[in-house]
């Protein structure tokens, strides 16, 4: 019973407006599903804010789908089962089962029950995801590891939100929303899309209003205003993270998918030395970083396998190699200079590597060598590799066997632009074997009217590796290595030849002062197609005119008179490709220790900014509770019904430490129960009760209740609880949620 209920008669309930039916309360079961829908919409909205950091939309559908499944499972469990204990468990189990089905089905029982192998699979994919996050620029390519990490994040956020709904604490759904909204701000605040902050805030307010008490409108509006204003201003208060603005003219950073920024790296200003090498091979060597075999129709990406092998002392035979092909062993000594990457530049196929420091491992399918935490910069190592010498008969007789073709290397979207398939058939459709088809495609792209240009794709807006970009490239007939490699790889797949794209460095220039050393600059970054032939393996081709050297496979193929280049020599062609009016460097690798320290300091500031932002969000309930208490103290000092203000604050203080304080209880009954159940200072409670009663029911000239008396009683009540309870009462005061609970709570 409130003090005002004793002093004044209750106001009559307002009559419904004419012509408007009385408002009906929504059943609790309906509210559950409305709450779940609003929570999912808020999570999906906050998740959509990540579009400034990732390309495409596939990652959003994956994350939103997993979140929906977890929320539906929890809401259905609460609707069907009597005990609320099972709802969070059902939501958690469904999330784990779906993640297992999506990313580790072949290691799980029935595809959904994870095993120890499933845990190892998740760890491997997560490591690749963290590596991709570190290495890629914004907007990043949504690699498998990144998408899985986002899916795990959304499942966790949905599960936490479901738990909060089960506890009837919808206001705390802000906790899982906060990290989703802060991720773009942590990466680069100026890229934050304020629209999704506002949409998320509106959905959050709608969640608070569904089933809330009628008198909670001002509380909801005040909280919502704080969330909206804070969400819009917080990103600009955080320090900037990693930026893509140019810091200097040299250096090169190769991420998980070097193809993404290869064009920008080629269009840089003055080239810098990436690495140097000497070799015992019969000709200069191509040094690969990685291979890209996952073609979505929009872009090429690496398949970061979950299987890996550590130890670089001995590599297996390359995939597809049958042993009948003649091979000679050669060696290359590599010194990495101004190149920052987690891939080790190596020839293909590598047999062994000596001297590389750090935790390196190799992928069984591509034999590419990479590391999660170590960098190739500054490494010096020796690699032995095989020079394959297949005969023309072996090449001509090699036919792909579907059961032995590496997975995914023939995959193409259902709809392909007609110019791609038509060109492939016109150029190579009449060739007698897959190898002769490959040679025909290579020769067609190297001949006039095709020309090499790094600027035409940018000027005509087709600078990409997807099907649409390839179609325009075949019409314009001008581009750089990315377009030539993509076009040949896709046309080869359309003819039934497995293909992939390799990214690395072409042979570079011979150092005349340190012969037989070769120097490889940032201008030598290159992409080329590799085609698969059963019994031989993956072979390199060079369709880009004016770049690299044409491989000499088959003793019978000495020279092709249709091509202007002399193919009887394996010496590399001129490799300088710098173009006038080049775009500025966008590399981020620091040149000096001071710049490295500055970059690390920037990341540290960004991390501190994120922590500060999270702390501010966490302190919102405490700040609002303090604001409510100060408002009551202000009422007491101004003499505006001080007894009621003090009595409300004492009741809320008791609620904050976990004790009930029903509205129907008088101050006398409440004080007696409080002193009996929690051993508090009877004199302080009794004196305060007497002051409240005197102020509420005494003469008008009676002494006014002072804020100091209220402070003493609050301190007595709070000290009756433990330190952990007091901390929880400060950060998440239950009294704030009292008026937000549904009527049936």
Image: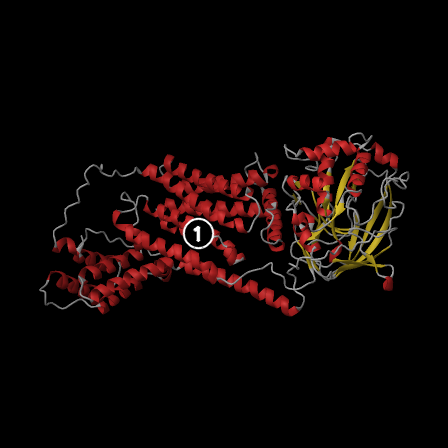
Q: Foreground residue, 119 or 358?
A: 358
Residue at the image position 29 percent from the left and 45 percent from the top: 742
Near-viewer residue (478 or 97): 478
Q: Position of residue 599 (x, y in %)?
A: 60, 64
The residue under the point 47% across, 39% down is: 69
138 to the left or right of 359: left
- Residue at x 35%, y 60% (from the top left corner): 622
Is residue 728 in view? no
Residue 554, above or below 384: above
Q: Position of residue 505 (x, y in %)?
A: 76, 52
Q: Percent x, y for residue 602? A: 56, 64
**SS at circle 1:** helix
Quadrant showing the C terminus? top left
Image check: 662 left or right of 31? left
* Residue under the point 90% across and 45% down: 568
- Quick one: label 1, few (<14), some, or many (20+) residues within 10 Å? many
Say whether residue 584 is visible. yes
Q: Which residue is mark 1?
A: 197
Q: How is the image coloured?
A: secondary structure
Viewer-proximal residue among 425 and 569: 425
Tell me the quarter of the picture where residue 671 sits.
Answer: bottom left
């Amino acid at each position: 019973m409130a003090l005002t209920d004793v002093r004044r008669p209750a106001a009559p309930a307002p009559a419904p407006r004419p012509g408007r039916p009385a408002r009906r309360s929504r059943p609790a079961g309906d509210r559950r599903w409305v709450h779940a829908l609003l929570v999912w919409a808020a999570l999906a909205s906050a998740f959509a804010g990540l579009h400034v950091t990732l390309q495409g939309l596939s990652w959003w559908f994956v994350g939103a789908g997993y979140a929906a499944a977890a929320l539906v499972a929890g809401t259905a469990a609460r609707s069907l089962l009597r005990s609320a204990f099972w709802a969070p468990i059902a939501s958690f189990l469904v999330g784990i089962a779906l993640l297992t089905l999506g990313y580790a089905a072949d290691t799980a029982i029935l595809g959904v029950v994870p095993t120890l192998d499933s845990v190892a699979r998740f760890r491997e994919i997560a490591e690749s995801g963290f590596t991709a996050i570190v290495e890629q620029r914004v907007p990043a390519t949504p690699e498998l590891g990144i998408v899985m990490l986002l899916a795990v994040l959304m499942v966790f956020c949905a599960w936490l939100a479901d738990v909060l709904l089960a506890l009837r604490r919808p206001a705390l759904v802000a906790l899982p929303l906060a990290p989703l909204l802060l991720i773009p701000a942590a990466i680069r605040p100026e890229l934050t899309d304020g629209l999704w902050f506002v949409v998320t805030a509106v959905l959050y307010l709608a969640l608070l209003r569904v089933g809330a008490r009628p008198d909670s409108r001002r509380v909801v509006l005040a909280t919502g205003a704080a969330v909206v204003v804070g969400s819009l201003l917080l990103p600009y208060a955080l320090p900037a993270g990693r930026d893509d603005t140019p810091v200097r003219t040299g250096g090169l950073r190769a991420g998980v998918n070097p193809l993404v920024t290869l064009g920008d790296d080629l269009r840089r200003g003055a080239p810098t030395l990436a690495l140097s090498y000497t070799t015992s091979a019969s000709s200069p060597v191509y040094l690969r970083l990685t291979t890209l075999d996952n073609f979505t129709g929009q872009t090429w990406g690496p398949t970061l396998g979950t299987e890996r092998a550590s130890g670089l002392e001995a590599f297996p035979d390359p995939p597809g190699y049958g042993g009948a092909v003649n091979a000679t062993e050669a060696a290359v000594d590599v010194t990495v200079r101004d190149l920052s990457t987690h891939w080790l530049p190596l020839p293909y196929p590598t047999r062994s590597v000596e001297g590389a420091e750090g935790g390196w491992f190799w992928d069984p399918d591509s034999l590419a060598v990479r590391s999660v935490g170590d960098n190739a910069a500054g490494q010096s190592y020796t690699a032995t590799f095989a020079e394959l010498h297949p005969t023309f008969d072996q090449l001509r007789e090699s036919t792909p066997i579907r059961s032995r073709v590496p997975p995914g290397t023939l995959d193409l979207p259902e709809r392909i632009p007609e110019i791609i398939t038509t060109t492939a058939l016109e150029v190579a459709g009449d060739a007698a074997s897959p190898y002769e088809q490959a040679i025909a495609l290579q020769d067609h792209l190297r001949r006039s009217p095709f020309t090499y240009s790094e600027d035409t794709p940018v000027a005509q807006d087709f600078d990409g590796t997807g099907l649409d970009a390839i179609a325009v490239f075949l019409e314009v007939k001008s581009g750089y290595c990315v377009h030539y490699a993509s076009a040949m790889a896709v046309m080869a797949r359309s003819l039934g030849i497995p293909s992939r794209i390799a990214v690395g460095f072409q042979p570079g220039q011979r150092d005349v002062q340190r012969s037989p050393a070769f120097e490889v600059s940032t201008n030598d970054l290159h992409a080329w197609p590799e085609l698969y032939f059963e019994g031989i393996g993956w072979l390199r081709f060079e369709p880009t005119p004016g770049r690299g050297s044409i491989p000499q496979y088959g003793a019978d193929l000495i020279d092709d008179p249709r091509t202007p280049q002399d193919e009887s020599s394996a010496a590399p062609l001129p490799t300088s490709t710098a173009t006038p009016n080049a775009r500025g460097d966008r590399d981020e690798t620091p040149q000096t220790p001071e710049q490295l320290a500055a970059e690390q300091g920037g990341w540290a500031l960004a991390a501190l900014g994120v922590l500060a932002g999270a702390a501010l969000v966490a302190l919102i309930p405490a700040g609002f509770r303090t604001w409510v208490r100060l408002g009551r103290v202000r009422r007491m000092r101004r003499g505006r019904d001080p007894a009621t203000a003090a009595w409300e604050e004492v009741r809320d203080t008791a609620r904050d430490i976990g004790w009930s304080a029903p509205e129907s209880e008088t101050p006398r009954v409440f004080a007696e129960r409080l002193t009996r159940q929690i051993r508090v200072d009877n004199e302080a409670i009794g004196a305060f009760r007497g002051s409240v009663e005197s102020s509420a029911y005494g003469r008008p000239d009676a002494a006014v209740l002072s804020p100091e008396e209220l402070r003493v009683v609050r301190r007595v009540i709070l000290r009756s609880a433990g330190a952990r309870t007091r901390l929880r009462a400060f950060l998440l005061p239950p009294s704030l949620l009292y008026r937000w609970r549904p009527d049936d709570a």
